[in-house]
């Protein structure tokens, strides 16, 4: 990445050094002539020579087709020479755009539709004018292809669970590719991942089956804990016969409190046992 940035910076410096080369004798003659008539017709030429750019804008000035400075002019007032100088305004504010939904085949052969949003701004006005025809449109196209390339190397589970990592990977890739265009990609976000309807049903059935399996495991664990508690209670009651009588009375109170027409009276086995033996 550092080597690409160095190459981009070097190519930009080479372009500017070439543009700052000699204008030639005829070029300097035109510049001097334009300056002379500007001074001669000063009250009138001032309306043509003075230009204003806003706080969030910069002006890239071309003199006889060559860039005059390595940085854009502005904000505020600047002067140009009539007939020889032209300028291009560049907006430095952050621009956001939506990536249209892209049909992508993931690494595990699942077709999904993914869209996103990209935030970028012009970091170098001179490079954005001199190195690319339309920096905005080129960045939009590059974002679409980058989204396809990055998600094509991911499984469906990674796409659904690691959106932040995918966004960072896309941002680094776009920022590296647009460095020579004078573009700074600030943020990339994945908005929505649309799955095929059949796959949605299959995933819903799988999740429902997993929930049912967990519910059965929890119910089995509850039954096991309850059986252990009943075993401990039976051991305590067996040590004290009077505790069993108290349990009978408590059961009767519970049944009577519910206003039932039928009352079940538990008869202790130690009372019936002598009759059974006879």
Image: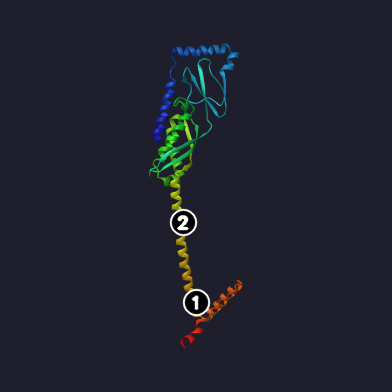
Q: Using the rendered image of the protein, determine whether residue 187 is visible from the camera's viewpoint.
A: no
Up-down relation of residue 111 to residue 207 (above or below): above
On the picture, is 147 further left or further right than 264?
A: left
- The crowd level at tag 1 (other Cα within 10 Å; few <14, some 14-19, many 20+) is few
| Badge 1 element | helix
Tell me which numbered mark, 1 or 2, is placed earlier along the sequence: 2
Give the vertical position of 24 relative to 3 (above or below).
Answer: above
Say if 81 sits above or below 208 in the image.
above
Q: Residue under circle 1?
A: 236
Q: State the CA–CA distance, disc 1 to disc 2.
A: 38 Å
Percent of width and height locating residue 157: 42, 47
Location of residue 224 in the rendering, given as x and y in whole percent from the top left corner: 45, 67
Which label was assigned to residue 211?
2
Query: Which residue is nearer to you in this view: 234 or 271?
Result: 271
Which is nearer the eye, 183 or 243?
243
Quarter residue 170 falls in: top left
Give coordinates of residue 30: x percent, y percent. 49, 12
| Residue at horizontal 43 percent and vertical 27 percent from the top | 12
Crowding around mark 2 (Cα neighbors within 10 Å: few <14, some 14 to 19, many 20+) is few
* Mark closer to the observer (1, 2): 2
């Amino acid at each position: 990445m550092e080597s690409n940035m160095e190459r981009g910076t070097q190519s930009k410096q080479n372009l500017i050094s070439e543009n700052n080369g000699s204008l030639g004798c005829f070029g300097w003659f035109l510049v001097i002539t334009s300056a002379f008539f500007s001074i001669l017709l000063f009250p009138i030429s001032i309306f043509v020579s003075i230009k204003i750019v806003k706080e969030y804008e910069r002006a890239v000035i071309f003199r006889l087709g060559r860039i005059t400075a390595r940085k854009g002019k502005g904000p505020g007032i600047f002067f140009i020479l009539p007939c020889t100088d032209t300028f291009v305004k560049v907006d430095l504010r952050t621009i956001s755009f939506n990536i249209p939904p892209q049909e992508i085949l993931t690494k595990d052969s699942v077709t999904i539709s993914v869209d996103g949003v990209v935030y970028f701004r012009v970091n170098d006005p001179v490079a954005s004018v001199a190195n690319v025809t339309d920096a905005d449109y080129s960045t939009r196209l590059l974002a679409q292809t980058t989204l396809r390339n990055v998600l094509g190397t991911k499984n469906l589970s990674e796409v659904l669970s690691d959106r932040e990592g995918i966004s960072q990977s896309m941002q680094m890739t776009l920022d590296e590719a647009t460095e020579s265009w004078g573009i700074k990609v600030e943020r990339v976000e994945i908005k929505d991942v649309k799955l095929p309807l059949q796959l949605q049903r299959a995933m819903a059935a799988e999740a429902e089956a997993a929930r049912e399996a967990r519910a059965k495991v929890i119910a089995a664990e509850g039954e096991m804990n309850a059986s252990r508690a009943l075993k401990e209670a039976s051991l305590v009651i067996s040590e004290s016969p009077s505790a069993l009588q108290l349990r009978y009375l408590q059961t009767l109170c519970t049944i009577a409190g519910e206003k039932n027409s039928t009352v079940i009276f538990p008869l202790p086995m130690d009372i019936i046992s002598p009759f059974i033996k006879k």
